Amino acid sequence: MANSKQAIKRARQNTDKYKLRHAQRSVVRTAVKKVRADIESQDKDKALESFQKASKVLDSAASKKVIHKNGAARTKSRLSKAIKAIN
């Protein structure tokens, strides 16, 4: 348990930041799942549309340091590659 005022404040800030980042990470995962579902259904138009939304969400999360920027780039690259593979 935190004893000093500084440690109490730091603990409070950490829990608040955790809740915010956890929610933002959940939004990212949901967006990526939607793109993967559209890819599975072989619907290229819907996949492209949901990919554009997911790309924006990924970039936003990366800029806020919720996820690593290279991780966001890698995810976008893999989703893009999968969409291009749809016939």
Image: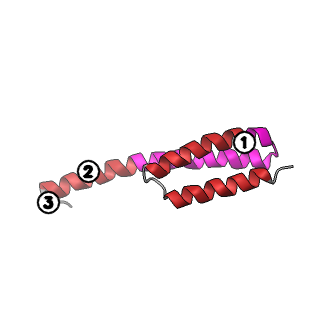
Q: Which residue is mark 2?
A: 12
Q: Residues within 10 Å of mark 2 (few under 14, many from 20)?
A: few
Q: Quick check: 42 above or below 78?
A: above
Q: Position of residue 20 (x, y in %)?
A: 40, 46
Which residues are drawn in magenta?
20-47
Q: Does the magenta portion include 29?
A: yes
Q: Spatial distance from mark 3 to mark 1, Cα to Cα?
A: 52 Å
| Circle on res. 3 | 3
Which residue is most to the left? 4
User: How many residues crowd around disc 1 within 10 Å: few (fewer than 14), some, or many (20 or more)?
Assistant: some
Q: Nearer the viewer, residue 7 or 63?
A: 63
The spot of residue 54 in percent (x, y) is: 61, 44
Instruction: Please state which of residues 10 and 55 is positioned toward the viewer in this rendering.
Output: 55
> Which circle's residue, 1 or 2, is located before the other in the chain?
2
Which of the two labelled residues, at mark 3 and mark 1, occupies the earlier sequence position? 3
**Residue 59 versus residue 26: which sits nearer the camera?**
59
Separation of disc 1 and disc 2 at Cα? 41 Å
Name the spot of residue 83 as percent of width and height, x first: 76, 50
The amino acid beneath tag 2 is Arg
37 to the left or right of 2? right
Identify the mark at residue 48; answer none if there is no mark: 1
| Residue placed furthest toward the right | 87
Q: Nearer the viewer, mark 3 or mark 1?
A: 1
Name the quadrant containing residue 5: bottom left
Prevalent SS, magenta region = helix
Residue type, mark 1 in image: Leu
Residue in view at x 73 percent, y 43 percent: 47
Image colouring: secondary structure
Horizontal and vertical percent for residue 7? 18, 58
Q: Residue at 80% of width from left, 45% of height from top? A: 41
